[in-house]
């Protein structure tokens, strides 16, 4: 049996975008005259459980306020896309792994809780850095009804790839993405981003890397638990 696909479990596995995402939310609040300003700690806590699309709705409910969460989310996505289009570096090893996969005939899938516009902006901004290597499959928020840690998006990626879970590896940057990958029956490689800094224990027992490389991918797919140094 060979590794036939890599599933990147969020745009945070490609680039460190959490701070831009937080800035986009705060820009959306200013645009609509909402007197909120999320600190990093507030944003990270809202992101931690995953499971829904509406951070603004959940925050408003916590405060006992009423806002147009759909409008805020739409404006946030637009701001986020604009910020990503300005350019953002790929995380360590991403370009190397994508080119390795392309040369070896390993399919590439991207799963994201973002809308099409931010994802398109990120992919366009990083196209040269990726050597033009495309994704074969993209499952975005509009393609599913339930977000991670629910496995729906991971399972949809496997269906689109026409592969069973034993032939693919999920690369995850957060604990909720890890839960989704595991629930879909996938072996996983932890590639923690900034949002996972406060929860390193959630990646115990699986291969962890801080720079992607073929060696770490193969070790994780084979089920070898280790700290991978690239």
Image (tube, rainbow, N blue to C red):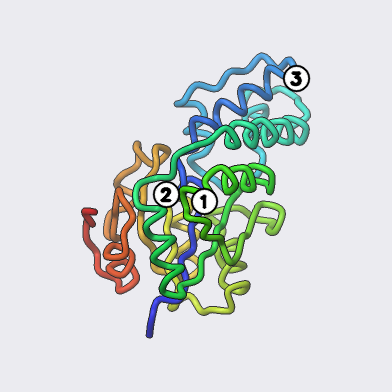
Residue at mark 3: 32
- At mark 1, the secondary structure is loop
Q: Determine the residue positioned at 45% across, 50% down.
A: 13
Mark before the other along the chain sequence, 2 or 3: 3
Q: Pinpoint residue 213: horizontal percent, then vertical percent.
A: 31, 59
State the image quarter where residue 96 is shown: bottom left
Q: Determine the residue positioned at 49% across, 63% down.
A: 7
> In the figure, 50 relative to 207: above or below?
above
State the image quarter where residue 212 is shown: bottom left
> In the figure, 21 relative to 127: above or below?
above
Give the side of residue 94 with respect to residue 115, left or right. left
Mark before the other along the chain sequence, 1 or 2: 1
Which part of the image, by quadrant, shows the C terminus? Answer: bottom left
> In the figure, 7 relative to 212: above or below?
below
Q: Marks 1/3: CA distance?
A: 28 Å
- At mark 2, the secondary structure is loop
Residue at mark 2: 173
């Amino acid at each position: 049996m060979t590794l036939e696909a890599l599933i990147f479990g969020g745009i945070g596995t490609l680039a460190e975008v959490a701070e831009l995402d937080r800035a986009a939310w705060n820009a959306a609040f200013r645009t609509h005259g909402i007197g909120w300003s999320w600190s990093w700690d507030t944003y990270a806590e809202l992101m931690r459980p995953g499971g829904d699309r509406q951070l603004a709705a959940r925050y408003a409910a916590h405060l006992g306020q009423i806002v147009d969460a759909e409008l805020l989310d739409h404006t946030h996505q637009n701001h986020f896309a604009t910020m990503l289009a300005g350019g953002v570096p790929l995380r360590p090893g991403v370009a190397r792994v994508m080119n390795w996969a392309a040369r070896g005939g390993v399919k590439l899938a991207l799963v994201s809780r973002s809308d099409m516009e931010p994802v398109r902006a990120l992919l366009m901004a990083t196209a040269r850095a990726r050597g033009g290597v495309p994704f074969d499959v993209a499952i975005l928020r509009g393609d599913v009804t339930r977000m991670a840690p629910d496995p729906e998006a991971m399972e949809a990626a496997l269906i689109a790839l026409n592969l069973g879970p034993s032939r693919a590896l999920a690369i995850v940057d957060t604990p909720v993405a890890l839960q989704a990958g595991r629930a879909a029956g996938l072996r996983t490689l932890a590639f923690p981003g900034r949002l996972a800094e406060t929860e390193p224990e959630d990646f115990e027992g699986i291969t962890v890397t801080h720079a992607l490389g073929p060696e770490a991918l193969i070790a994780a797919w084979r089920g070898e638990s280790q700290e991978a140094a690239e």
